[in-house]
Image (cartoon, grey):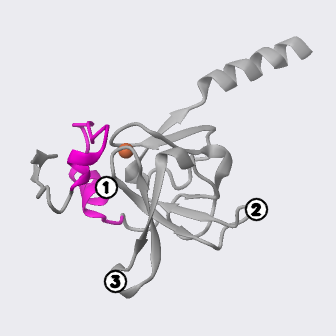
Amino acid sequence: MVFCGRVYNLEKFPFFMKKKKPATNPKLSSQQCHVLYEKGTEAPFTGKWLYNKEKGNYRCASCGAELFSSDTKFDSGSGWPSFSDANKKNIELKDDHSYGMQRIEVLCKNCGGHLGHLFDDGPGPTKKRYCINSVSLDFEKKEKVRKELKKDEKRKK
Ligand code: FE
């Protein structure tokens, strides 16, 4: 199967066939394809969402599934966007023994795209740190919320 200008072996990447909603965004860059479908990692401190503090939702860059809320985003100092919680119905966790490490891989349940890893050193009640590649995410600003807040401000005046 050819996707993102790359040839993928379907035996190695079975999620292209198995998932209900396969990767459909034809505009993914080759870096995005590398991270999402070859389990790559963007260089730390380079991702475009690392310092994003706007309110909104983070979606899968490939299929659009809603994955993380800005409410759970925190600065972990790791160099990757970090979240203390996830939209678990769209997240799949898998044991990952690659590179001689024992980690938990975080995947998009919808399209099988690789997002990052999950660690147990996060803040708050969950104690979780979802360490996620920026290139695996799209950000959707919460415009509606903002408009409503403005209305409230006007009402108070
Ligand atoms: Fe996805």
Above or below 96: residue 87: above
Crowding at mark 3 (Cα within 10 Å: few <14, some 14-19, many 20+): few
Residue labelled 1 has its Cβ within 8 Å of some atom of ligand 1: yes
Rendered residue at 60%/65% (across/down): 129
Residue 26 on the magenta segment: yes
| Pointer 2 or 3: first along the chain | 3
Q: Where is residue 116 in the image (x, y as percent from the top left)?
A: 43, 62
Q: Name the residue under label 3.
A: 99
| Quadrant of the image occupied by residue 75 | bottom right
| Pointer 2 or 1: first along the chain | 1
What residue span does the magenta drawing correspond to? 14-41
Residue 29 on the magenta segment: yes
Q: Distance between the residues labelled 2 and 3?
A: 29 Å
Residue 151 located left or right of residue 31: right
Q: Position of residue 20 (x, y in %)?
A: 31, 38
Q: Name the residue under label 2.
A: 124
Is residue 138 among what the camera can see?
A: no
Instruction: Please tell me the numbered disc located at residue 45.
Output: none
Q: In which quarter of the image is ligand 1?
A: top left
Is residue 140 among what the camera can see?
A: yes
Q: Where is residue 124 in the image (x, y as percent from the top left)?
A: 76, 62
- Mark 2 and 1 residues: CB-CB less than 8 Å, in contact? no
Q: Element under label 2?
A: loop
Residue 34 located left or right of residue 116: left
| Pointer 1 or 3: first along the chain | 1
Instruction: Please tell me the numbered disc located at residue 36.
Output: 1
Rendered residue at 15%/46% (across/down): 3
Q: How far apart are marks 1 and 3 (CA)?
A: 18 Å
What amino acid is labelled 2 in the image? Gly
Q: Element under label 3?
A: helix
Above or below 3: residue 11: below
